[in-house]
Image: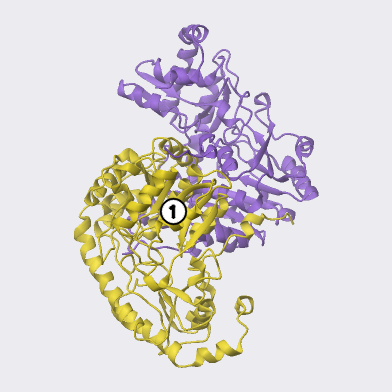
Chain colours: A yellow, B purple
Amino acid sequence: MPKISTRGQILPSSPIRNLMPYARAAKKKGIHIHHLNIGQPDIQTPPQALEAIRKMDSKIVAYGPSEGQYSLRETVANYYQKFQIHIKPEDVFVTTGASEAILFALFSCFEQGDEIIIPEPFYANYIGFSQISDINIRAISTDISNGFQLPPVEEFEAMIGPKTRAIFLCNPGNPTGQLYDETALAKLAELILKHDLFLIVDEVYREFCYDGKFKSVLNFPELKNHVVVLDSISKVFSSCGARIGYLVTQNPELQKIVPKLAQMRLCPPALGQILAEACNSNVDQYLDPVKAKYDARRQKLHERLSTIPGVQCYMPRAAFYNMVGLPVEDAAHFCRWMLSDFSYRGETVMMAPGNGFYFNRELGKNQVRIAFVLGVEKLDRAMDCLEHALLSGSYAKVETTTSLSVDKLMP
Amino acid sequence: MPKISTRGQILPSSPIRNLMPYARAAKKKGIHIHHLNIGQPDIQTPPQALEAIRKMDSKIVAYGPSEGQYSLRETVANYYQKFQIHIKPEDVFVTTGASEAILFALFSCFEQGDEIIIPEPFYANYIGFSQISDINIRAISTDISNGFQLPPVEEFEAMIGPKTRAIFLCNPGNPTGQLYDETALAKLAELILKHDLFLIVDEVYREFCYDGKFKSVLNFPELKNHVVVLDSISKVFSSCGARIGYLVTQNPELQKIVPKLAQMRLCPPALGQILAEACNSNVDQYLDPVKAKYDARRQKLHERLSTIPGVQCYMPRAAFYNMVGLPVEDAAHFCRWMLSDFSYRGETVMMAPGNGFYFNRELGKNQVRIAFVLGVEKLDRAMDCLEHALLSGSYAKVETTTSLSVDKLMP
């Protein structure tokens, strides 16, 4: 049998998805699972967007332009004005989800072996994308005790070396729910200019800010040639399956490279683009109640978590995630046990083990990421499960008697 | 301004798409362009597939499984039985077009710096995909005079070195229209086993064979662990914009790696998958008249081309492309001239310069790829244009007086 590649083998599996076999087994036993592991909102896709798909009258689902339909790029540029961001349709490249936008950004800004600085914990898939594009991550640890705020600019500067090409942020933060404020971003902007780096920012949770005001890196005109913004309709318009994202850049050199990467895969999904274009009308009318829902869930989650003894939590300011410290030694093992050995009133809860969001896998071992993508009532029941699991003592007993080997637990 | 990456800069731009600015300029002048440059069929997408999209009743366009919807993987496995290919749904991974299937195959089979052997001319985007995944192409030239048949197995064997990981074919061939026969494939199969290589085959034109019978590499049971097949609904079901492709492999090791690559980009397009699943019913009822249409076009094209003095052509056996030698020195320049300076009865024709399909850019300079994706009548008018352009002598005059610099001609 021919040998497969090392680079394929060393790819991490997703901390968000790799407990799925346990979840399937639990479901087979008739246990209801509250899915707080994945950022799949239960919110409806904008009805006019679904209607646009149903009314589609073309007879051929044909290739479109590699950079995306111009009419969609126009509506995206218009939408950004809401945030005082003034860009041209030509600055917006439609991608197959923000995932592809990440890949395009990495391939166009980095040589093989270059370095990228990212505060951790961060969205787990950044690791895989960096690996396949041969980029080395330098991670700066941030702290659960202050809600994972942006590290001081000095910590970034200390990491900068001859191979550093960019700083990468996710703002608002997945998995942290943190929102970086204007002052902190302004200091980082100075550093970017001083060292002539790229600033790549994943802003897909922009619309969900509860405490404080969102500031985009596109709001800094001096960073015009330095900024690459990654965006997506997945979360904002609850259209994760459409696979429509955007790479936004005003850098004229990147604007030459990105279309070549885009041509290589021909075009972004045509049906998703029809949906995306229709999403961009009546945005606030759709989003205001959605945002209110998430806010209520955030508060419910925090209220419940903060009364469970030993749980370390903070109030997330944005997005729909919360990194939470649990009174267990190995949260990955605990999450698995919750699926394989636990239920309360016939229910259990699925969470994403926290250390999968760290580059340094020794960090975040007692943390989990909870996505508040379910309604307040379901969230309440899910927290009943978590509380019961932690307080009943049955896990504590398992923890002290079991070797915490992942392999042993694999079905 | 920060420096952009060399690997981005050296990416080739698409020979199929990079004359677009000239086409737009011609259209602005009111000239009608016959698009024979791109494999965008004028055939309707199966009506029941469009209907499935219109009837979609879900309220949330949600993430699906990373490997694709199981129900779709089942219909694909069933569809293959038509070709006596017996695989399980688990052997089929749904990708975002065949483009992504190529990328997944390269990342999972090759280390950085490994080599792949491909007969040229080949589908131009293989070059870019190999570049970004750090794989070196070793190209074997094939010959227009025999319709670009598969080179003798000895030529492949002579290319095999310590870094060789795979042989890559496109069968039926884009851009050649060639169909590799069973005997030639059987010899190659022996070579694959002898050297324990992967055999990666792009079979997206499988359904369009006019002379001779299609044989898939999946029909060779002894290659079970060696074969990766790339597939797509784009051409077969005229659904290029849906961006649904498949990677098919029975290799148990690849079946562990591909899901990790798939998880990284979350899932393939949800709407496209609905369309794709519906495509797989009443396949032959849909395809029989489509195939008859392409066959008539193929014959018309060949009839017209073979009467133009100086044109070198052959009868393609499959797919919907023909590589054609023209009586010009630089076909890329000629194609540009056809758009920028030529029209006949207010019409002109757009073709893809042939040397873009060669790894060795000194080859195929007088060739063009013609896609017979338009009806017989339009094809006839397009050939009137080509004939007139070549016979009128006006291009010959330009050719002898102009420096054939690409840069000079860029708008």
Residue A279 against residue B10 in the figure, above or below:
below
Answer with the quarter of the image where residue A314 lies: bottom left
- Where residue A332 sits: x, y (%)? 52, 76
- The answer to whether any part of residue A290 appears in the image is yes
Q: Residue at x 67, y 61 (%)?
A: B253
Q: Residue at x 77, y 41 (%)?
A: B161
- The answer to whether any part of residue B41 appears in the image is no
Give the side of residue A317 with respect to residue A139, left or right.
Answer: left
Residue at disc 1, secondary structure? strand
Residue count near mark 1 (Cα–Cα under 10 Å), binned few <14, some 14–19, many ≥20? many
Give the side of residue B201 with respect to residue A297, left or right.
Answer: right
Q: Residue at x 67, y 59 (%)?
A: B251
Give the side of residue B107 with respect to residue A156, left or right.
Answer: right
- What residue would you read off at disc 1? A168
Q: Residue at x 34, y 71 (%)?
A: A373
- Where residue A273 sits: x, y (%)? 34, 48
Residue B242 against residue A121 in the figure, above or below:
above
Residue A315 against residue A347 in the figure, above or below:
above
- Where residue B128 sits: x, y (%)? 55, 39
**Which of the pair B288/B366 is nearer the observer?**
B366
The chain holding disc 1 is A
What is the number of callouts on the image? Answer: 1
Quadrant location, the C terminus of chain A: bottom right
Kind of residue indicated by mark 1 = Phe
Quadrant location, the N terminus of chain A: bottom right
- Where residue A142 sits: x, y (%)? 44, 66
